[in-house]
Amino acid sequence: MSALLWIVVLGGLLALYGKLWQRQTAGRVRVTVQAEEAVLIEGEEAELVLTVENHAWLPIPWVDLSQQMPKGLLVWDGTKWLEELRVLSFLLPRQRLQRHYRVRVIRGLHKFEAAAVQFGDGLGMQEIHSRLDAEQMDNVAAKFPLSLDRGMEKDKIGQVLVGLLRSQNAPEPGPIYRPSYTQLLVRPRPLDDWELPLRLTELVGEQAVLRWYQEDTSRLQGVRSYQLGDPYKQIHWAATARTGELMVKQFETTSETEFYVLLNSQLFDPYWMGTNRGIIDHSCRLAITLLQQVEATGTRIGLATNNSWSGAGSLHVPIGRGPGQLDACSAALGGLLYRAYEPFAAMLRTFRGQLTNRAMLVIVTAYWDHSIAAEVEQLRVLGHNITVLVYPRAAHRLQGLYAAIPVIAIDLPLSDAADAGDEVEAAASAASAASAASAETEVRA
């Protein structure tokens, strides 16, 4: 009888301990994933730190954590490359467990998904299985201006200009264990000199100096007679009415130069039909290379593209100067998606209205049509210095382009071409099928 009593008492104590253990550990386990490097460049191997913390005063005899890696990232566990982080261990009271991993990174904004965790009291009385919900990041103020053409709020835009977003540290009570998640922003790798076409050095070499001296529209000097090629918007109508002939405004010259890279992510008509990861990745590398070299000469730089971060609008980094401006452009290129938000011609039309001074514009494109040619011609008429960098798939389709505009062919590396061949082929097949269906509908009509 006494043995039975002891068994009942022991069972009650175990049940009581299980309840106490569940209450003490609930909401006091945190998982953090973060990179050691503040700035991540594609192609490099970064160190990833996975931290599991027990904030309770009771031990956790066993914990099994499974953290799926974002798509495209592989982690080295010491023997092989994996797509998942796995931790099987125990945690003492107030203990922090850290695991370090090597990870291969590719360009993009990578967000860790919810992790699966299960742990128990070691006695079999309580066992918790949970799916960790993704936590909302703290807002991080932007250092440099970044705008979207669709009127996105500045505080939201600023959140994308960081290489590593901070995690939320405040514990949240309850049976669901929420980790502090990290978004890894991997920036494009600048191209080496041997990867650039020889003619491309003209854009950032001595010939670029010849383009520095131009009129500053903010410094009016007087008026002069109209000459063929002068922009119509510079006509001085009062002086024209007074003299009886066309007169245009004469501005003082300045050595201030504005340099823009305009990236086209449209590859088909319609623009949403398909994508090519190899071309977009390579164009981002090409863009940061040009911006980096031009910024070193003291020139003001900017970036515009019909691509976007989250589909909220075409991306536009306003003109600026200094390492901070280059950092903003690099971060913007790092987070670009693999699809166009709008036709490139529409983006050029909006961008044209935002320009205030004559600028040097470098267009990087793998697609061309008459509407793009018309917008490029409008920019040329306004006095902007334009160069077109074109990939092979559009090199022979530059119809409507003014003959004096320089065109430089860009070869896509075999690795990038192989990575995206299937996507382009699939998109082209879809486009052909859509065209055939449209033609069949017209015939029936």
Image: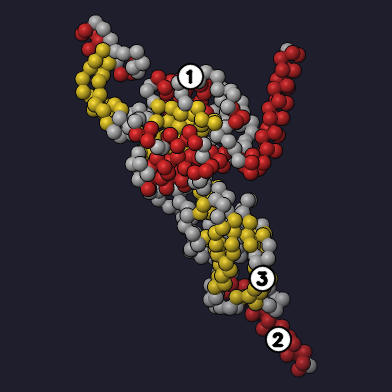
The mark found on residue 197 in the picture is none
User: Horizontally, is 278 left or right of 38 in the view?
Assistant: right
- Is residue 134 in view? no
Comes first in the chain, label 1 or label 3: 3
Q: Mark 1 points at which residue?
A: 403
User: Horizontally, is 229 left or right of 41 in the view?
Assistant: left
Category of crowding for the residue at label 1, using alpha-carbon neighbours closer than 10 angstroms: few (below 14), some (14–19), many (at least 20): few
> Residue 325: x percent and y percent?
38, 44
* Kind of residue sitting beneath label 2: Leu
Residue most toward the bottom?
2
Residue toward you, 315 or 302: 302
Q: What element carries label 2?
A: helix
* Kind of residue sitting beneath label 1: Ala
Which residue: 38% across, 21% down?
382
The mark found on residue 88 in the picture is 3
Category of crowding for the residue at label 2, using alpha-carbon neighbours closer than 10 angstroms: few (below 14), some (14–19), many (at least 20): few
Q: How far apart are marks 1 and 2 (CA)?
A: 92 Å
Which residue: 70% across, 38% down?
422
Q: How far apart are marks 1 and 3 (CA)?
A: 66 Å
Residue 173: image quadrant is bottom right
> Residue 430: x percent and y percent?
70, 30
Q: Are marks 1 and 3 in contact (CB under 8 Å)?
A: no
Q: Distance between the residues labelled 3 and 2?
A: 29 Å
Residue 116: image quadrant is bottom right
